[in-house]
Image (tube, grey):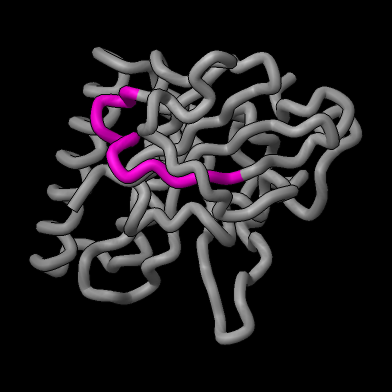
Amino acid sequence: MGHRALVAYARPDGLYDLRYSHWGGDELVLVGTLTAQTPLGNGRVDADLLADSVALDRLLSAFLDPCVHEALYIVSQSFEVTAYRVLWLEWSDGREAGHGAIVEVEPGGRDFAVRTWFQATKTVLGDVIEMGGLSRRAARTYLEGRIREDHAGRLYTYATDRDGAVPFSDSDSGPDTGLGSDADSDSDSESDRSSGSGFG
């Protein structure tokens, strides 16, 4: 099964090259292994590129599937590594699978706390939905609010159609978690392009 992760390497032009790690989501192991000397984490990251020259908003909307990936790593040009947990904001009946969120975490206690809180909250909400206490939309709205307010999370929508990726469409403006505000989703900012990292 694996613990799938997406790894985004910053480029000088402010865009990102993307690679896949089959076990990178397990205990956020890549935080300590991605360095300038070991850019592929001693073989934990696939050498083949998934895509190159990808903007941050397109990374979320076209590549970071919340049903598949457990973690996202952003690697700066100086190999500073920031880890995010990927959270799937739907329930497993196949409907509206593309709603997700990312929350910045560090390996250990913070990561464990976010994962435990999310799983418990989502399970309880699922039970309330089954009992008719909340609609799915209301439950997801509550979950989104808690993620943004309590965990400084970033909401996003992942989707594909027959022709490929659907552009990022989340119009809510949540806190800036380093991947830019939702209002900046249509294009990279000038600061993103000049810094090459996407972080301010």
Q: Is residue 37 above or below residue 62?
A: above
Q: Is residue 89 visible from the viewing direction of this image?
A: no
Question: Which residue appears at 43% of the width and 57% of the height?
Answer: 65
The x and y percentages for residue 2 are 22, 47
**Residue visible at 54% across and 74% down?**
160
Residue 98 position, x and y percent, is: 44, 64
Is residue 8 rendered magenta in the image?
no
149 to 5, vertically: above or below: above
Instruction: Write the residue at 56% across / 81% down.
Output: 161
Please say whether residue 163 is visible from this viewpoint: yes
Total labels: the figure holds 0
Q: Residue 27, position in %: x, y?
A: 25, 25
Tell me where residue 199 sits by quadrant.
top right
Residues in magenta, as a range: 18-29
Left or right of 185, for residue 141: left
Residue 150 point in image, percent of width and height: 40, 27
Q: Is residue 20 left or right of residue 199?
A: left
Quadrant position of the C terminus in the picture: top right
